[in-house]
Image: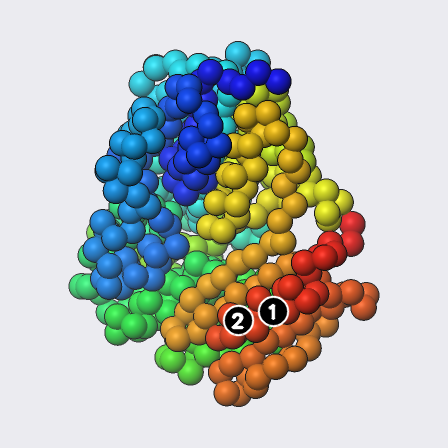
Amino acid sequence: MTPPRSVLIVGASAAGLSTAEALRRQGHQGRLTLLDAEPHLPYDRPPLSKQVLAGDWEPGRAQLRSQAQLDALDAEFVRGEAAVAFDAGAREVRTATGRVLRADAVVIATGLTPHRLPGQQGQAGMREPAGMQGPAGMREPAGMQGPAGMRGPGQQGLAGVHELRGLDDALTLRAHLTAARRLVVVGEGVLGGELAATARKLGLDVTLVGLGQAILADQLGGRVSGLLTRAHAERGVELRLGVAVEELTSAGGRVTGVRLATGEVLPADAVVVAIGSRPATGWLAGSGLSLGDGVECDARCRAAEGVYAVGDVASWQHEGLGRRLRLENRTNATEQAQVVAANILGADRPYTPIPYFWTDQYDIKIQAHGLPSATAEVSIVEGDPEQGRFAAVYREDGRVTGVLGWNMPKQARVLRQQHLATQPVATA
């Protein structure tokens, strides 16, 4: 295989930037271009819901690299310009301004786009990619009219309704929360839990609403998610779990509350919608690529000849698990980038990581390796949940499928090595 003379990376966040750096480290000397819809220097996203939102970090501290480090990459950065169409056969990307970019190899690293409540429009009026469907389990009110999808006046573009995907979102929300007293967080996943924890740190009255029966129940199972849910309640978060959102209430173009399917109205000065995300693939419609839960790739993260995907947007065949997998976390973005870069340059390496994710909420640090699930049997093998430190093992059909540390990162790594390092973490 002849190494490509030019590589175009669409998306310059953690996955895209890591791919560019890995290409240079592994010997790529040709043209390197990174295209990104945001105008900012590449920045890290996990701190947005915690340190940046809390005001502990100024925005510059979240930058992944300095300007000098980016200059040393000898790459062209095309910022503030979104990709809107792709021809996989020609390896040709068209941008919102009509620019056309071509390369011998293209890497798709466009990440995620947030789910929205029916009728919710982004702060900047961002259009959702064509063909996207609403989040599973979201209740849409009866009698909906038109594309807005939500009853009641003024539901689109309401002041005080936020989502948190990028740096600008975090700064806008941070400014609003300094003047607010009552926040409603819609969504009981990782982001919802982190937002609720940060808002309590800022002294707000917080109510968390979600369809699940506990915070992170799907990811951590009933026992551990129950402990996390209790931790939020003990720190003053009002919980409305197992209930759908009916609509947002408003006055004068500003949100005033959240009406639940039970009829209860939760008063709010601000609402954050954190009901999950989907791969940002709308711009790839008609590209010739296979799109399912992300850009569908083979075991080498290759979506087509000369086309690869990396990070949150990539769905690839995990040879160790014998199944298709897509991971949404910072660690995966960096690790997958190394394999993608190597394969672009002629290697033949499958990507077979042990899945991993973490979340920090209050003084609680949770690290999970493998594939813990709601259906697994959970055993506490070290520490004590009542003391706020423990390690757990997840088993399904007698086989260890995941390990977890609650304020025990070292023990979680040891358990990972013992149970997951030499075997697939789940059966097909």
What's the residue at 81%, 68% (across, down)? 398
- Callouts 2 and 1 close, C-beta under 8 Å: yes
Image coords of residue 296 (percent x, y): 63, 33
Task: Judge left or right: residue 134 versus residue 270.
Answer: right
Image mark count: 2
- For the N terminus, give its image quadrant: top right
The residue pinned by badge 2 equals 410
Within 10 Å of the Cα at label 2, are there few (<14), some (14-19), or many (20+) other Cα atoms? Answer: few
Image coords of residue 400 (percent x, y): 73, 65
Image coords of residue 66 (percent x, y): 25, 42
The vertical placement of 119 against 84, above or below, is below
Considering depth in this image, is 415 or 16 the residue closer to the camera? 415
The residue pinned by badge 1 equals 414
Task: Judge left or right: residue 143 versus residue 41.
Answer: right
Considering depth in this image, is 265 or 221 the residue closer to the camera? 221
* Amino acid type, callout 2: Lys
- Disc 2 to disc 1, how far (Cα)? 6 Å
Image coords of residue 220 (percent x, y): 60, 66
* Colour setting: rainbow
Task: Judge left or right: residue 170 versus residue 426.
Answer: left
What's the residue at 57%, 16% (across, down)? 2
The vertical placement of 414 against 143, above or below, is below
Residue 224 is marked as: none
Q: Is residue 109 visible?
A: yes
Q: Tag 1, which secondary structure?
A: helix
What's the residue at 64%, 69% (across, down)? 415
Task: Judge left or right: residue 181 versus residue 420.
Answer: left
Q: Tag 2, which secondary structure?
A: helix
